[in-house]
Amino acid sequence: MNRKPDLIIEAVRYDPQGRIKLVRMYERRGPTYSDLRLIDRQELLKRLRANQRVWIGERQPYLASTFQLKAPVRLFGPKGSEMIISEKVTNPNDRDDLQGAPLF
């Protein structure tokens, strides 16, 4: 991987319609990553539309900014009604799906 991810999603929460409600994530700050943060779906959409590199991953204990990356996250569908999915999703439907990210 040439560039480090801009955001690393650790866990996700969905609403009853299957849309992302919140994600628990780390944000790249120069050579390191921020503390754990919560952002909503609108903020995540804004960052994906700005072509930020977003991955699902988990922080390695006692190794500061070292993560085990699982899958990249991307937008799928027509502009204005995009779904947020991970690359592991082979058959996207009308719901957000961050396969590989645990629920919280």
Image (tube, grey):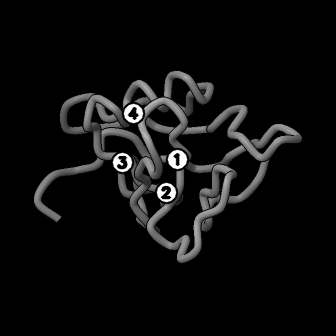
In the rendered image, which residue does mark 1 sit on? Answer: 9
SS type, badge 1: strand
Q: Earlier in the sequence, mark 3 or mark 4?
A: 4
- Mark 1: amino acid: Ile
Question: Few, some or many C-alpha atoms within 10 Å of disc 1 (few <14, some 14-19, many ≥20)?
Answer: many
Which residue is the extreme one toward the front? 78
Q: Which amino acid is tagged 4? A: Glu
Task: Please name the residue that numbered disc 3 is placed on.
Answer: 65
Labels 1 and 3: the sequence-earlier one? 1
Q: Sort mark 3 into few (<14), some (14-19) or many (20+) by Cα contacts within 10 Å.
A: some
Most extreme residue toward the left is: 2
Q: CA distance from mark 3 to mark 2?
A: 14 Å
Q: Real-space Cα distance between discs 2 and 4?
A: 12 Å
Element at label 4: strand
- Name the amino acid type tagged 3: Ser
- Which quadrant, please, contains the N terminus? bottom left
Which residue does the numbered mark 2 point to in the structure image? 56
- Residue 44 in the image: above or below residue 95: above
Mark 2: amino acid? Ile
Tell me how far mark 1 sits from mark 3, CA to CA.
13 Å
Above or below, 38 relative to 18: above
Q: Going from the N terminus, do you reach mark 3 or mark 2 first?
A: 2
As drawn, which residue projects farthest toward the right?
A: 16
Residue 47 horizontal/vertical position (percent)? 37, 29
Give me the C-alpha separation between circle 3 and circle 4: 10 Å
* Helix, strand or loop under label 2: strand
Discs 2, 1 touching: Cβ within 8 Å: yes
Front label number (3 vs 2):
2
Q: Which residue lies under the disc numbered 4?
A: 27
> What's the CA distance linking mark 2 and mark 1?
5 Å
Which x, y percent locates residue 23?
63, 38
